[in-house]
Amino acid sequence: MGRRQVLITAVYGALMTALGCVLFIAPELDSVAWAGIGLCGAAAIVFGVRRIRPRRPGPWWALAAALVAMMGGDFLFGLVAGAGAGTDPPSLANLCYLAMFPFVATALIGLTRASPTLVGRAGLLDLLALGSAALLAGWVFVVSPRLAGGGGLTGTEWSIQAAFTLGDVVVLVVTVRLVRAAPRNPSAILLTTGAAGMLVGDVSYGIAESRGGLDPGGPADFAYVVLYATWGAAALLPSMARLTAPPPTPAATDTPDRGLGLPWLLAAVAFAPLVLLVQAMTGPVQDGPVIAAVSGITLALLVTRLNDAVRHHAEGLRRERTLRHAGTVLVSVTDAGAVAVAVRTAVRELLPADTPHIIVVDSNLTDLLPLNELSAPRIVPVSATPPLWHDRLREFGDVLVCPLDAAVLYIAAERRDLHTVQDAVTVLAGQAALALARIALTEAASRRDSDDYLRAVAEHTNDVVLVLDDDERIRYTSPSVTELLGIWPTPFATLREIVAPDDRAQVDATLGLALTGDRDGTRDTWSLRRPDGTRVLVEVRFRDLRDDRLVRGMVITMRDVTAQRRHEMELLRRHWEDTPGAANRDNSARKYH
């Protein structure tokens, strides 16, 4: 904690202490003191939000509104109480108190929903069940006997007081859940302390009213001062931003929230029937409605917990079935395109129904990604993906990036949906990576076998056989190329690089025609110059077998037709010499010469 932070907290604490002293030393100024305490607590929250700037400030604004509403009720109550002890609070003050709980509920929903550690509600439901049982115990063993002894409160006033107490218990349970999820967060501890103060204050107020009236400066006032002070101080600490920060990517060793355990939940559910049994055996049942309400609440919480367990189990079975089916499909695929289709289908089935999402399988930009993005699946902002996909994925703020051996899988969806499927997609990515590796190894072995077959066939023929890869580099060359062209191609050479510069134009023309024309074959005749200066006529045939699983390349066959063409020209010359016209020309030449 920095020096400025210590100074701000010290000034706030001193101010709240001074106002609290005014409340206890000068009870006639309690309305002014409550107004100052409430406004200071709300102002501290506003100041903390402006200074620390949490990513989601809505819950804190709601908490500030709750303090203002409660301050309004205390101020009105202080004005009326100043007229004489035992005066009932005005209806407007009760409305202000009741209006506080919707704001508190909004704040707590926002805090628990955005907390980085609250990923399940099992523990929260267990705590609510235990809190309900504790509330029943307090009512039966503490509040009810005091009410039976007398008091000046009407049934309506007791109903209002019971509503306050029930709300206090719920708030306390939720804040305790925050502390249980983030035990080292000072802001969460202060929120829980304030909730406890609110519960103690309302209970103390009810007891005091049942005895004839609330005396200023009692335990209730002290508990309310603790509420204002701690909730305001919670917003002044930097730890308040962590309560509303988006949850980070869970580690692989994280375990789901399993709650407090079945024994505690069963004990909370069985407590109300046990109290009913004790009262029925010892005398008339005096707290039947309260026992019935608590029993219904705990039973509903138990059913909710069981429903969640059944739903999570069903989701686990669905994910397991989807992964098993995807594994079966990936075992039988033979090309990368089929792997991409299987992955997209499996991811759509893994995501919750009707979930908006975008799935991209990128097999081109793997070498452009940082190494840390290729190490393990993780959730990153869209801005961390390659720029090519920004426009397509910008509809969502976060993307799940999974490496797939020679490709990368991008899944864009809401962050909570990505967390839901992250573990399953990790397993799916491993299966897809194995399938791609198997396909690559199979293709490499097939090409090796194909090259071995070509080598075995072409080594004993005078024809030259070349195999070009997709980048037009020579992958295989038969030994007869030395006899035909007088050279041996260097590794990774192209077809243009093994001919003389003057002959490259005819090579480029035929190669371009072969790449864009008929795949059954392109024929041509080249006149190529050897290193010794002599020329050779070569008959060339191209066959595009890039789609063939065993070849995966362009096959070129070259044959030396120099002697054949020379023999054809000699035969043509002899044919023309044996004709009558040629004989007449020969006689005329001998006669006149």
Image (cartoon, rainbow, N blue to C red):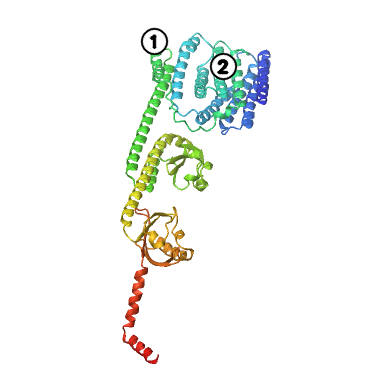
> What SS does tag 2 mark?
helix
Q: Which of the pair 92/366 is nearer the observer?
A: 366
The image position of residue 275, as x and y in percent, is 40, 13
Residue 589 versus residue 85 in the image, above or below:
below
| Cα separation between marks 2 and 1 | 30 Å
Q: Mark 2 points at which residue?
A: 201
Q: Name the residue under label 1.
A: 278
Residue at 43% from the left image edge and 67% from the top image edge: 534
Is the residue marked by circle 1 packed among few (<14), some (14-19), or many (20+) residues within 10 Å? Answer: few
The image position of residue 55, as x and y in percent, is 57, 34
Residue at 35% from the left image edge and 49% from the top image edge: 448
The image position of residue 361, as x and y in percent, is 43, 45
Which quadrant, please, contains the C terminus? bottom left
Residue at 55% from the left image edge and 29% from the top image edge: 242
> What SS does tag 1 mark?
helix
* Mark 1 residue type: Val
